[in-house]
Image (cartoon, helix red, strand yellow):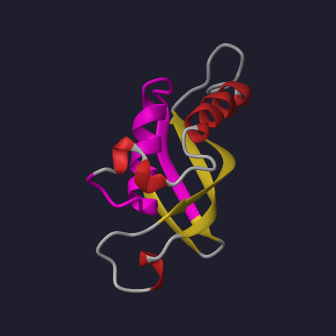
Amino acid sequence: MFELMVEDTFSAAHQLKGYKGECERLHGHTFRVQVFLSAAKTGGEGMVLDFHLIKEKLKMVLAEFDHNFLNELAYFKDLNPTSENLAKLIFEKLKRDIPQLSKVTVWESPNTSASYS
């Protein structure tokens, strides 16, 4: 099985609703996002998918979040803008164009991440 990984970042602010602690206050992160693709075989050119195409699609999705207050985005009207929900949203958006997508991991700090697959 082949596995590819592409990584990018975006900066955004959020507040966790219903959370008792520091994260209930407005704060920001430089989120690191990793997308993973899996495939049993490569295409004729020897690639699962061109890295350039994956980077382009990821950059387009992350542009929606970059330098925004995540709580104000329509998707988070009824959901907390947690790393878990971000990972799921990014996965759903990318899966439309990248069928080989297997997992999205969102890092909100160097030591904490959440994944959706």
| Residue 11 x/y as whole percent | 65, 55
How many marks are shown on the rendered structure? 0
Which residue lies at the image location 52% right of the left edge and 38% below the top edge?
38
**Residue 89 colored magenta?**
yes
56 sits left or right of 97 in the view: right
Q: Does residue 55 lie above or below 34 as drawn?
A: above
Q: Which residues are magenta?
A: 78-107
Q: Is residue 116 visible?
A: no
Q: Is residue 46 visible?
A: yes
Q: Does residue 109 lie above or below 76 as drawn?
A: below
| Residue 17 x/y as whole percent | 33, 69
| Residue 49 x/y as whole percent | 63, 25
The residue at the far bottom in this view is 21
| Residue 65 x/y as whole percent | 55, 45
Which residue lies at the image location 56% right of the left edge and 44% below the top edge?
36
24 sits left or right of 58 in the view: left
Q: Closest to the observer: 32 or 10?
A: 10
100 sits left or right of 7 in the view: left
Q: Quadrant of the N terminus?
A: top right
Give the quadrant of residue 12: bottom right
**Residue 4 colored magenta?**
no
The residue at the far top in this view is 44
97 sits left or right of 67 in the view: left
Q: Closest to the observer: 77 or 5?
A: 77
Which residue lies at the image location 56% right of the left edge and 50% below the top edge?
68
